[in-house]
Amino acid sequence: MERLPYIDEHATILDADAATTWAAVLRTMCTDPAAPRPPLGFAIGECTPRQRLVLKGRHPFAVYEWIFELDELGPHRTRVRSQTWADFPGLHGKIYRALVIGSGGHAVAVRQTLKRIGRQVRPLTVR
């Protein structure tokens, strides 16, 4: 299969080991790390624990992959990279791309998702 066109990449560095970060990615993106189910509109294309999660999807206006890759930077430091690859065929696809990507809405949603992953690895403060 031909590679989809590259859209963008966003990243965050978390003060957590790869195992903790991986569990946070799965909780955020798939609800349950023990039995991952991707969000509506996605299927799991690849799942390499502590390294890479590929979510794939398609609808009439787009074919897409949302990839999460973890890079261990130290014993308690992990970078989470979020890449988007997508094709928007036809006139309706071009319009959809302008609405989703061109408007900046996609970038905002991805950054919010990375923040949610980050909140999953921080311990709760007891008051």
Image (cartoon, rainbow, N blue to C red):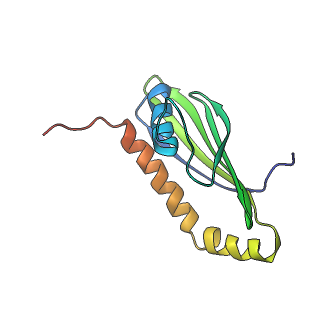
Q: Left or right of 121: which side holds 127?
A: left
The residue lying at 64 percent from left, 33 percent from top is 47
Give the residue furthest to the top: 75
Q: Residue 16's x, y, as percent?
A: 42, 30
Q: How many marks?
A: 0
Q: Residue 46's x, y, as percent?
A: 68, 36
The answer to which image quadrant residue 50 occupies is top right
* Vertical side of 13 occupied by 19: above or below: above
Q: Residue 115's x, y, as percent?
A: 43, 50
Q: Left or right of 111: which side holds 103?
A: right
The residue lying at 64 percent from left, 72 percent from top is 102
Q: Residue 36's x, y, as percent?
A: 54, 36
Question: Which of the image's four quarters has the C terminus?
Answer: top left
Which residue is nearer to you in this view: 112 or 63? Answer: 63
The answer to which image quadrant residue 89 occupies is bottom right
Which residue is nearer to you in this view: 9 or 38? Answer: 38
Question: Which of the image's four quarters has the N terminus?
Answer: top right
Which residue is nearer to you in this view: 4 or 62? Answer: 62
